[in-house]
Amino acid sequence: MELILKQDVENLGFKDDVVTVKNGYGRNYLIPQGQAILATPSAKKVLAENLRQRAFKEKKIIDDAHKMAEAIKALEIRIAAKATEGASAGDKLFGSVTKADLVEAFEKEGHLVDKKFVTITGGNIKRLGQYNAVIRLHREVTFDFPFEVIAQVG
């Protein structure tokens, strides 16, 4: 079944992509949720015209995303978290550091990044040290961002 996505769907595609999915997934989930429409010939023509009109605007959006990516790459983020003390305990954290903590650190620096577009390599962080996150600002603008989790003082 061919569908046109009306919004980004994780592990499937981005808005306005034409994708092929199994009939049940399309009919029972994507279409009722409002995430896709059937890719009929007339719908494909409308999509092509919309994409042509949007191409110029899209270029400006991509350029803005690249500028924001360069600004974020220039940051050095250190997230302070409560950690166990003592030689036997090592560097374990109380709780964990999540992508929400990283997004909050970006907001403190003046950059708004949506939490759903941040992926921390390896999932939630439970130890002190250097880590990496993949940040997607646009479908064509993704980059790796290194950051550090340090022990909270006090």
Image: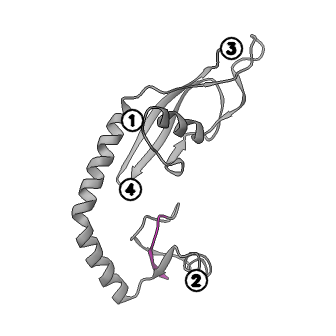
* Residue corresponding to mark 4: 139
Q: What x and y, as percent, mark residue 83?
A: 70, 21
Mark 2 or mark 1: whose residue is earlier in sequence:
2
Looking at this view, name the residue that lies furthest to the right: 88
* Residue 57 location, quadrant: bottom left
- Using the numbered discs, state the Cα–Cα distance from disc 4 to disc 3 in whole angstroms: 41 Å
Q: Secondary structure at mark 3?
A: loop
Q: Judge from the rendering whether residue 55 lies leftward or rightward of residue 132; answer left or right.
A: left
In this view, 24 is above or below 78: below
Badge count: 4
* Residue corresponding to mark 1: 72
Q: What x and y, as percent, mark residue 144?
A: 43, 38
* Residue corresponding to mark 2: 27
What amino acid type is highlighted by mark number 4? Arg
Q: Which residues are magenta?
A: 1-8
Q: Judge from the rendering whether residue 119 lies leftward or rightward of residue 153; answer left or right.
A: left
Q: Nearer the viewer, mark 4 or mark 3?
A: 3
* Label annotation for residue 154: 3
- Using the numbered discs, state the Cα–Cα distance from disc 3 to disc 1 in whole angstroms: 28 Å
